[in-house]
Image (cartoon, rainbow, N blue to C red):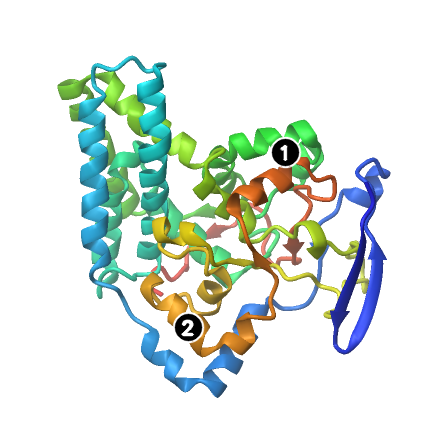
Amino acid sequence: MTDSITHRAANKTFTFTTPPSDSPIEVLNEFYWTKEKEPHFSRRKLILAKHPEVSKLTGYEPKTKWYVIAIVSLQFYLAWYLRNTPIFSWKFIGLAYVFGATANQAMFLAIHELSHNLLFKKPLHNKLFAIFTNLPIGIPYSASFQPYHQLHHKFLGDQYLDADLPTYLEGILLSNLLGKVFFAIFQIFFYALRPMFVTQITFTYIHLLNIIIQLVVDYFLIKLNGWHSFIYFLMSSFLAGSLHPCAGHFIAEHYVLNENNKPRSILKDNENISIELVPAETYSYYGSLNLLTWNVGYHNEHHDFPYIAWTKLPELRRIAHEFYDPLPQVTSWCGTIWDFMFCDVNTLWNRVKRVGNEKSGTNINNLDQNQ
């Protein structure tokens, strides 16, 4: 399958033909390497210069905690309700998929909000509440997510520091039909385990507290309700990061898919993809699933202003619409998962990468977790 693509940038028009999926491996097996800086810093400066009122949107959103408490309570109720239900019954799996996975995806993304200190004024309060938010996920996760996610923001596309990027091995093994289907089904494991193999972070007392509280709660959940309740939590977390509509945001946010594909240029010495040809590397989605996911679909807006809470992101887009309306958008998270798996031009190579200054495995000791 070969697609012709017309791209307009800097008052110039470029027409390309994307390579078919059976092209030689040396044609396909590269990311979009560039020396150009990520676009969010410069766009933030331009928006603030033209719309200084945007700065008034920054700050935490106190009402978010009440929604989180309600969802955590719902998950514990459903875990209790299913305590005697066979695990492989339609009832158990159906409730885990429809309610459990949706709820736990919301908890993943509530922890995302907390990682930016957007629920409470004090950073410590956000960290502690994230541990509470973590409870229905079943495994300790919140304390590690924050530093890795901040690296993703500060070093977007960095080959060593951005653990959101697929590794070279993933690209080699999974950039085929079966590999992409496998990745889409089990992507939650890639996002959970990949960071540990890419960059190490400092283990703190918050990590220890996260582990201890999660294990204690899991122990009493199993002791009081049995294993089925605990498995409900784990199944909800797995399905939340698998073939679930809300899981489409994982791929939609930064993969260069479909008509946004452009020819690659392997970065060697002075070779580079020029600024006119670097594809957009962050994509927003403005559909109804944002109602279930704290507006994470407003992803360009979020990367431009990570200190604006989810309730204010639509207002940011309204104020600065001339900056966001021309950008490529994702219209369907379900469609994104489908296109990623079954469209030949979409592979795990389709990410923008930058040469990092740190060696792989560097321990990040000075990461500011309060920003």
Percent coordinates x, y for residue 241 in the rendering: 45, 36
Q: Indicate whether 213 appears above or below 353.
A: above
User: Is any atom of residue 364 visible in this view?
Assistant: yes
Q: Specify whether 133 is left or right of 309.
A: left
User: Is any atom of residue 199 visible in this view?
Assistant: no
Residue lying at the far front in this picture: please name it. Answer: 288
Q: Quadrant of the C terminus?
A: bottom left
In front of the other: 285 or 133: 285
Which residue type does callout 2 highlight? Leu
Pick whichever of labels 1 and 2 is earlier in the sequence. 1
Q: Indicate whether 213 appears above or below 364.
A: above
Q: Residues within 10 Å of mark 1 (few under 14, many from 20)?
A: many
Residue drawn at (30%, 29%), measured in percent from left and top?
Answer: 233
Which residue type does callout 1 highlight? Lys
Residue for badge 1: 180
Number of marks in the image?
A: 2
Q: Which mark is residue 26?
A: none
Residue drawn at (75%, 70%), measured in percent from left and top?
Answer: 8
Distance, label 1 to label 2, CA atoms, is 34 Å
Q: Specify whether 8 is left or right of 61.
A: right
Residue for badge 2: 316
Q: Specify whether 330 is left or right of 24.
A: left
User: Which image quarter: residue 124?
Assistant: bottom left
In front of the other: 259 or 275: 259
User: Which image quarter: residue 184?
Assistant: top right
